[in-house]
Amino acid sequence: MLTWSYHKRLSRDIERWTGKGWLLPEGRAAILDELRQQRRGSRLPAIIGILGAVLLATGAMTFMSANWQEMSKLTRLIILFSAMWAAFGAAVWLQRTAHDYLLEAMLLLGAGMFGVNIMLIAQIYHIDGHYPDALFLWTVGALVVALALESRAALALAFVLMTIWTGAEMMSFDVRLHWPFVPVWVVGAAVIFRMKWRAGLHLATLSLGFWGAVTMLQLANRFNWTDGQTLALMALLTLPFFMLGLIRDAGKGWLMGFEPALMRYAMLGLLTASFLMQTDLRGSVRLDAVLFSLMLAVAALSAYGALSAYRSGALKAMDMAVLLGFAAWLILFHYVPRGLVLWVHAPIYMGFAIWLMAFAQYWAFSVLLPMALTAFGAEVLYIYAETMGSLLDTSLFFLVGGVLLIALAFGLEKLRRALSAPRSGGEGAS
């Protein structure tokens, strides 16, 4: 493991020991100061080493390409396998000699050379197969390295590769539901939990989100869903993750404390998808039976999450009503007549953004506040763009917009004063 990773874990342990009274504040300060002294510059060699590994892997590929035709098959195989095993051998030596600042670089180089070997061996023997299969084998190799040697760099490479693999299957070969991605992703997520790598959860979230979004688009093409229907389902799917973040703040950390970050991802997806719905869905359409069933299932799951958060104290009754009401609106939206889409959706969307501002302010979720402000401003601009030259001219738009913003500022200040007493049951996260 990297020295800086050990220091990071030790810093968290020191905070926990201090909180339990096992360590005096003076001792805590002295230990942390020494750790800071040891960590100065410790990341730079590791980062430079990883960049060097990337350059070495790239150099190996270009060298082989430049001299490919002049080499015999045996020479090519010897060079390929020697480079890969030399990288892994160097990693073993570095681990045994405590030169762990270069350990991740060598493991990344070894995992990278494994993929290079797959590609070039296929070229040597003219193996014309399904090229995403090579990406899958490369992903498996990187996961094996990550699991066996606890390499975060190899694990990060594995998530990048599995995302490219599933994207190639669905977008290049029109695979509707690429289910093989799911067990591979689960294995990668399990390795993250085993290594207790919180930063890796961001990679896992982004990878799964990419798969889910592309899968939803493939389903939309398969069942002839409209863009608005697809976006509505995407928005509904984010609500349970938002609930999970709320439940965590009631004192149940189930995902290594990652729930607040997951909630922010979910809220960003919810605001984006529900905003795009009004731009892509123009008429009154009825939902496909399959889509409607899925949306009801997600709405029920969101209702269960809201109820759990309410019982745990993370949500008040009004908060739960807003979230469930917005989830219901995402379904009912499709039955609004063409001429009323903008004027019905805009007040609901802006009202939801205002609620989110108050919610973020109350719980000190600093990242949610700019999200809500951006959503509110985007909706105001969208109304202006849609109505300019018809119902509102430029001057009227700015007048109405100014009044609305002043009213919003006044309302938020009143709400802040009314809710100035801290709410019990949550810790608040930024």
Image (cartoon, helix red, strand yellow):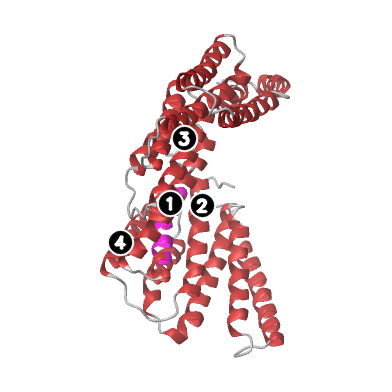
Q: Residue furthest front?
A: 70
Query: Which residue is tagged 4?
Result: 294
Q: Is residue 179 above or below residue 359?
A: above
Q: Nearer the viewer, mark 1 or mark 4?
A: 4
**Residue 231 position in % (x across, y down):** 43, 65
Tell me, yes or no, whether the two marked residues, 3 and 1, touch with CB atoms within 8 Å. Answer: no
The question of residue 244 being in magenta is answered with yes
Q: Nearer the viewer, mark 3 or mark 2?
A: 3
Identify residue for label 1: 241
Q: What's the distance in space between the residues labelled 2 and 1, CA to CA?
A: 8 Å
Viewer-nearest residue: 293 or 112: 112
> Helix or strand or loop: what does disc 3 sit on?
helix
Q: Is residue 372 magenta?
A: no
- Above or below 220: residue 389: below
Above or below, comparing residue 155 to residue 406 in the picture: above
State which tag comes first along the sequence, 1 or 4: 1
**What residue is disc 2 on?**
265
Q: Residue at x 73, y 24 (%)?
A: 40
Structural distance between the alpha carbons of marks 3 and 2: 22 Å
Horizontal and vertical percent position of residue 365:
58, 52
Prevailing SS of the magenta stretch: helix
* Camera-side mark, 4 or 3: 3
Task: Give the percent coordinates (x, y) of residue 144.
Answer: 41, 26
Q: Which mark is residue 158?
A: 3
Residue shown at 48% from the left, 76% from the top: 345
Instruction: Tell me whether the residue at label 2 lies in contact with that at label 1, contact meaning CB atoms closer than 8 angstroms.
Output: yes
Question: Disc 4 versus disc 3: distance between alpha carbons?
Answer: 31 Å
